Amino acid sequence: MQQFLSSPWGIVLAGWLAGSAIMFILWLVHIGLRNAGIVDVGWSFVMGGLAVFYAIVADGDPVRRALVGLLGGFWGARLGFYLLKDRVIGRPEDGRYTTLRAHWGDRATLYFLPFFLAQSLLASILSVSFLLAALHDAASPSSWDIAAVAIWMVAQVGESLADWQLVRFKAEPTNRGKTCRAGLWRYSRHPNYFFEWLHWIAYSVLALPAAFGWIGLASPAIMLYLLFRVTGIPATEAQAIRSRGDDYREYQQTTSAFVPWWPKREAK
């Protein structure tokens, strides 16, 4: 096993296999819960777990490895527990997944299996910046490390604040069926997504000075594509229009989709 983990490819393969096992177990759990939202929880914990795993088994500078494990592990744990409370425990299935379930019909349970397993593959691809940083043996802290930590802190504060503001808004019964425009949500329709993407920039900066560190830039690039074209903004906004109708359409006309910016004048 030690010889297997001495290779970067071996480390990635081991992480992917472990992640796939976790996602398979969560797929079995989701059958009883009838709530596919647990896939998002699993993805967050797998990503954070990979950061800690790479920090332990890689042979780069110990301080930088500790940064990888602490930053990635904390992010994954915070997001995972937030999603568990917000979308799984005592909650109905997220509208995005109920739409998929209705579309797939009787085969939905089976079709969700490759969907769950794909998350471990995605996690292994995105976590390449974790591994590159953990393998980098130059002395830490460097100016790159300091910049990465600063970006990470801004991203964590922003994402946590956006999540808290949304939870607080949804907790008010009078806000049912309305669109959150409180705090950061006044300046972006998806401030949580923006700061999530910024968080991936931090790991790319951490990995950039390493050998082949430029490959780590793929992580925020892939995340940006997913947010804009696949599972992020398109699916979220389609569900928001189904549930909030004209109120959300007006929100789309007046508020930046991603980067926080001053809102336009109210639509007529």
Image (cartoon, rainbow, N blue to C red):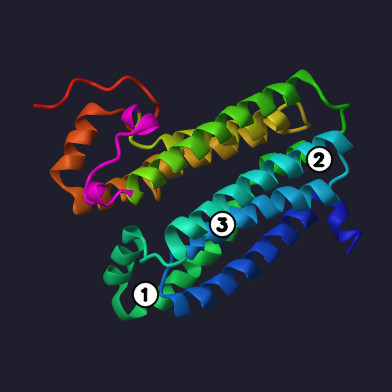
Residue density around tag 3, few if under 14, some if 14–19, many if 20 or more, within 10 Å: many
15 left or right, relative to 199: right
Asked where in the image residue 70 lies, by quadrant, the reply is top right
Looking at numbered disc 2 in the image, what kind of residue is underneath it? Ala
Asked where in the image residue 215 lies, by quadrant, the reply is top right
Earlier sequence position, callout 1 versus callout 3: 3
Residue 178 included in the magenta stretch of the image: yes
The one nearer the camera, 226 or 197, is 197
Label of residue 66 in the image: 2
Residue that lies at the very extreme toward the right in this rendered image: 3
Against 260, residue 221 (above or below) is below
Label of residue 43 in the image: 3
Looking at numbered disc 1 in the image, what kind of residue is underneath it? Ala
Where is the C terminus found, in terms of image quarters?
top left
Against 206, residue 49 (above or below) is below
* Percent coordinates x, y for residue 88 in the rendering: 45, 64
Q: Nearer the viewer, mark 2 or mark 1?
A: 2
Would you say residue 260 is visible in this rendering? yes
Label of residue 108 in the image: 1
Name the residue at 16% across, 47% down: 245
What element does badge 1 sit on? Answer: helix
Q: Which residues are magenta?
A: 172-187
60 left or right, relative to 129: right
